[in-house]
Image: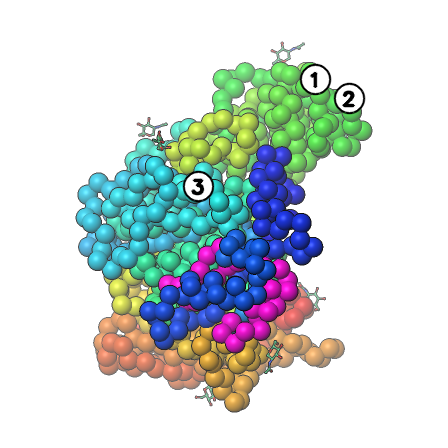
Amino acid sequence: MAGLQCLILSSVLLVLCVLGRMAYSHAEDQERKIYVVYMGNLGENEELPKTTHHSSMLEDVVDSRFQGQSLIRSYTRSFNGFAAYLTHEEQEKLASREEVVSVFPSIVLHPQTTRSWDFTGLRENSIRNPTVESDMIVGVIDTGIWPESKSFKDKGFSPPPKKWKGVCKGGQNFTCNNKLIGARYYNSFMPSTTGSARDTEGHGSHTASTAAGNVVKGASFYGIANGTARGGVPSARIAAYKVCYPSFGCQSSDILAAFDDAIADGVDIISVSLGNPELVALENDVIAIGALHASRKGVLVVQSAGNSGPDLVTSIVPWVFTVAASITDKGIITKVVLGNGTTISGKSVNSFNLKGNSYPLAYGNETTTTCDEQLAMGCLESCLDKRMVKGKVVLCNEDKGMEEAFNAGAVGLVVHSTRAPDVSFVVPFPFSGLTMPRFNDLEGYFNTTKNHTVDILKSEVVKNLNAPSVASFSSRGPNFLFPNLLKPDVTAPGVEILAAYSPLSSPSEFPQDKRSVKYSILSGTSMACPHVTGAAAYVKSFHPNWSPSAIKSALMTTAWRMNASKDPKAEFSYGAGHIDPVKAVHPGLVYDISPDDYITFLCNNGYNASTLRKIFGTSVHCPDKRTPNDDLNYPTMTFRFVSPIGKSAKFSRQFNRTVTNVGSANSIYKAITSSGLDYNITVNPSILKFTAIGQKQSFVVTFSGKLTSKTNLTSASLEWSDGVHSVRSPIVIYSTGL
Ligand SMILES: *[C@@H]1O[C@H](CO)[C@@H](O)[C@H](O)[C@H]1NC(C)=O
Ligand SMILES: *[C@@H]1O[C@H](CO)[C@@H](O)[C@H](O)[C@H]1NC(C)=O
Ligand SMILES: *[C@@H]1O[C@H](CO)[C@@H](O)[C@H](O)[C@H]1NC(C)=O
Ligand SMILES: *[C@@H]1O[C@H](CO)[C@@H](O)[C@H](O)[C@H]1NC(C)=O
Ligand SMILES: *[C@@H]1O[C@H](CO)[C@@H](O)[C@H](O)[C@H]1NC(C)=O
Ligand SMILES: *[C@@H]1O[C@H](CO)[C@@H](O)[C@H](O)[C@H]1NC(C)=O
Ligand SMILES: *[C@@H]1O[C@H](CO)[C@@H](O)[C@H](O)[C@H]1NC(C)=O
Ligand SMILES: *[C@@H]1O[C@H](CO)[C@@H](O)[C@H](O)[C@H]1NC(C)=O
Ligand SMILES: *[C@@H]1O[C@H](CO)[C@@H](O)[C@H](O)[C@H]1NC(C)=O
Ligand SMILES: *[C@@H]1O[C@H](CO)[C@@H](O)[C@H](O)[C@H]1NC(C)=O
Ligand SMILES: *[C@@H]1O[C@H](CO)[C@@H](O)[C@H](O)[C@H]1NC(C)=O
């Protein structure tokens, strides 16, 4: 584990990292790594001290010299297993033991880095259920939390709800209260150091306050985005589980430990703004495993889709609620005023003000003594000369030059921005990132004017006419493991979100940027995830007995319809659409799923009983016959069409679904289907009559038509309407070519 991470560390951390590992490997030929030994469900005999058992299992296989240091932690509260330093040989011995379900190396995951709630329609004065909302406990698995933040003060809060079984073990100088009711930390990177659940990065405070932070008036980042910062459920309680460390990341053995505790502590919803660095097998995916145990206990797990767009989403299992990130109707821009009076808009969160002064503009190639023209124009590393940039705003044709220009001491920087042109990030000095046309304008001014000067203004908030649309960085479908399951599930605000931050962390993430702030602006699917966590808690506060899948269904079938013509990947970008928490309280009908349905789903997707035993822990029985339609009662309908070579791509697919009435006892729903030139949809029956709450009705959707190579993707929809409620599911057919 440490090997890979150490490469990117500063020299100080590198030493710690190497030392940390040496203590456990000595001069052994065989390197010891962290392995997760997963033993499935808790056994019948819950009294048996499992930690003792884990130690004795290790004694059997681990060289006596290392036994004392091998065990990192035991999982004993929600499922059974442990994490330990093991050699390859030792882990193989353990894997062959009967009681062991699977053994896999721990890997490193990473965090996927306010007005946004108003944008979703959940307003400060929206109708609420404060008593039940106050019983909601939101568990946040992240970089920790800043307990002194105004977002987590407990004025007006009663003692924690009775169901709470957690603790406040945040380490030294860490106090919980009736808002922040629990804290724990896990650190397999450096198990011997004194730990703390205190957030030194800002990410965990940001996500926790977005989900369930207090209403805080006058919050802003140096006046930018000034307004009220608040979580989706301001009356709910928060429990923080710290698993991530600056420069290191988040060890999967620690994430699994946090799930083990959070489920047993009694949280209602778990928010995980973390993602696998790559596509991993289901049996090695700790978030999928942890979430599976959570779902069996009625706890919904919400996860960010990932920030690798347009590449594939890594949160892919049906029992997790997967969230894409979209831009809201408010965007942050930074204007550049040219010496001739023309203003050009670019992106950044720039809190600096050059006080109306213009500075000479210098292209990177004019301020170098070391690099050739091409490299210098991009302001690549070590190209800029400190003396030559002094007093100047630097112009670069690539967006890699921020660190270089900042360290060289330039007054400011304007670049051609390609990496995430639709997002503003907090910058450590005056900066604006321009799209190609705007950059050409600036270069044209530079070329045609001898005495070229610019002023970079402090950022401002402007109306975003393109909202909501999915951010370029948000990971997209299709689902690499379950091609007939649409992921992500929904989209939510994830761009330029103002929320609580850690005063210890540099807001721009540049160590030389010594500013300290209580609120900051971040972007990422990490920020979208807690919006859905908050929304789910809000729905649950009206329906405390709903299953995780019913809450998920409510948020999916009431989501705003997105405009497919704006996004070539359509539903693979935004799933069922953009969340509408207020509407989700009254969905009318829900698509419910029982935890056992997931087993059948996995059987139908080619997992055999022995692999499933590895994942579920208990013995699992797969139906003898795999049904060709691997229908899970999911609120979306998706089919990957394997087109015969050279043939016209005609498809026909049936989806069987069952809805549960949660609206009015006596109601009649009619099927309304979208229409298109290249497909037909029939629904049988097309009218559903209900006479009681909780009543279930089944139906079959037949979707047929032709895929054209022009799109390779056909989006359609089914909507059940009783005149009051509209229960909408996207239907997506795509070809393997996509
Ligand atoms: C406890 O932490 C707070 C916040 O960082 C700090 O202001 C305070 O000085 C600390 N107290 C002690 C005793 O370390
Ligand atoms: C934020 O807005 C409030 C009310 O409009 C104002 O009183 C306050 O000074 C503003 N804060 C900043 C930092 O601009
Ligand atoms: C260059 O332009 C700036 C601002 O437009 C002006 O103040 C300055 O006098 C000009 N210098 C020369 C040499 O023209
Ligand atoms: C730097 O590049 C710009 C844009 O291509 C060009 O106009 C300028 O003459 C170059 N300057 C030097 C010193 O090469
Ligand atoms: C500016 O001049 C350089 C060459 O000196 C040229 O390559 C570039 O295309 C010009 N830019 C614009 C926008 O005219
Ligand atoms: C300033 O210069 C740019 C680039 O040459 C040009 O497009 C623009 O029209 C000029 N603005 C004014 C007010 O002259
Ligand atoms: C969808 O987007 C397209 C292209 O941007 C636009 O022409 C169309 O009016 C939009 N449709 C709706 C319903 O907003
Ligand atoms: C079950 O599937 C796994 C992985 O595909 C395979 O290695 C194993 O041999 C299979 N077991 C049985 C009993 O078919
Ligand atoms: C779907 O429903 C139809 C009609 O009720 C039934 O014949 C078919 O077997 C069902 N398919 C599955 C996979 O359950
Ligand atoms: C849709 O159904 C109609 C009537 O059955 C048929 O004529 C048409 O070809 C179908 N369209 C497609 C794309 O299959
Ligand atoms: C559709 O699939 C075909 C064949 O797999 C591929 O060649 C084509 O580029 C795809 N088209 C689009 C728009 O993705």
Q: Name the residue that disc number 2 marks.
A: 369
Dot 2 crowding, Cα within 10 Å, few <14, some 14–19, many 20+: few
Look at the numbered disc 2 and give the secondary structure of its residue.
loop
Magenta-tinted stretch: 72-100
Relative to the observer, which residue lies in front, 344 or 520? 520
Q: CA distance from mark 2 to mark 3?
A: 47 Å
Q: Name the residue that disc number 1 marks.
A: 388
| Identity of the residue drawn at 56% across and 68% down | 94
Q: Earlier in the sequence, mark 1 or mark 3?
A: 3
- Judge from the rendering whether residue 131 lies leftward or rightward of residue 616; answer left or right: left
Relative to the observer, which residue lies in front, 374 or 337? 374
Three-letter amino acid code at disc 1? Met
Task: Confirm or deny contact between disc 1 and disc 2 (CB under 8 A).
Answer: yes
Residue 312 makes an appearance in the image: no
Give the percent coordinates (x, y) of residue 613.
50, 76
- The verdict on residue 482 being magenta is no
